[in-house]
Image: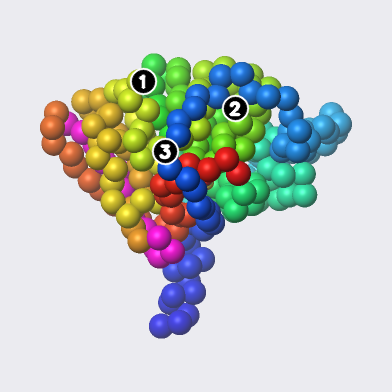
Amino acid sequence: MQHRAGMLLITYALLFIACQATPEAREEITSPPPATETLLEGNTSTPEEEAEFTAQRMRLVEGIISAGITDPAVIKAMQTVPRHKFVLPEYLDQAYANHALPIGYGQTISQPYIVALMTEALDLEASDKVLEIGTGSGYQAAVLAEIVEQVYTVEIIGALAEQAAERLNALGYHNVEVMHGDGYFGWEEHAPFDAIIVTAAPDHVPPPLLAQLADGARMVIPVGPPGGYQELWLIERHGDEFTTTSLGGVIFVPLTREVREK
Ligand code: SAH
């Protein structure tokens, strides 16, 4: 029994997120402030180091393909986005390991395989407009931005929202807009979306997110009790009908409801 639980744990994606917060406040990050103690400091590398990171990234993506990811657009995006620019300097040597890593503020950058799995499940087209809830480092947003025309992403921790906006801008991802706020409410102003991806786990599907799905759109969302296993759901909208398919068990950090600065 214990052995089985251990095996399950190994196969599950672990994304540790812990949060606290203060009531609703939403603020779009339009002109990010200059870098201070941000992850961008991990960016400076020699051409030789860059070549080594690229080689590591290609190996990581080979592993992701072996694990069952087939969508060419997703594979290309995973081969392109420099994950080493999204991790803290002290984790640079693990930038292309297939696991989640701390990014500060008690949060994590997601496991690459889970990023690929969720992105593939969205079945994206180049002309799509996508909403992400839980910007974190901005890595998932960059992967989406490689595939679709426009990405909107919402982050509840102000410092992370600012850093991600700054990083994405510096890396040339000008088709991503970041907002500091509670993603439970989605981003009404830009709705409806062709796809919604939620990278923190609520205990129920937020009705505002369902309402912001376009007809024929898809949402990928981990749903379950905080601190427990969640089910990764693929939800598809057909008119006013919603179908749900399970993509398996996962562990994500909880979707929190209090907007905080740090
Ligand atoms: N997608 C991120 C990793 C997700 S970690 C990446 O690629 O790096 C989950 C993120 O969700 C955390 O940064 C956490 O602060 C954020 N979060 C939690 N609850 C939220 C909410 N209600 N609205 C928006 N973001 C939320």
Given this view, does label 3 or label 1 mark the residue nearer the observer?
3
Q: Which residue is mark 1?
A: 190
Q: Is residue 237 magenta?
A: yes
Compared with 76, 105 (above or below) is below
Q: Is residue 33 magenta?
A: no
Q: Magenta region: which residues?
A: 226-238
Dominant secondary structure (helix, strand or loop) of the stretch shown in magenta: strand
Q: Mark 3 is on which residue type?
A: Glu
Measure the C-alpha gap from mark 3 to mark 1: 19 Å
Relative horizontal placement of residue 72, taking residue 170 as reference (left or right): left
Q: Image quadrant for the C terminus?
A: top right
Residue 262 in view, yes or no: yes
Residue drawn 50% across the image and 32% down it: 180
The quarter of the picture where residue 231 lies is bottom left
Given this view, does label 2 or label 3 mark the residue nearer the observer?
3
Residue drawn 77% across the image and 49% down it: 90
Residue drawn 28% across the image and 29% down it: 212
**Picture coordinates of residue 193 (x, y %)?**
33, 25
**Picture coordinates of residue 244 (x, y %)?**
23, 46
Q: Mark 2 is on which residue type?
A: Ala
Residue drawn 62% across the image and 49% down it: 105
**Picture coordinates of residue 3 (x, y %)?**
47, 80
**Picture coordinates of residue 115 (x, y %)?**
49, 42
Q: Which residue is mark 2?
A: 165
Relative horizontal placement of residue 56, taking residue 192 as reference (left or right): right
Circle 1: element type:
helix
Q: Which residue is mark 3?
A: 24
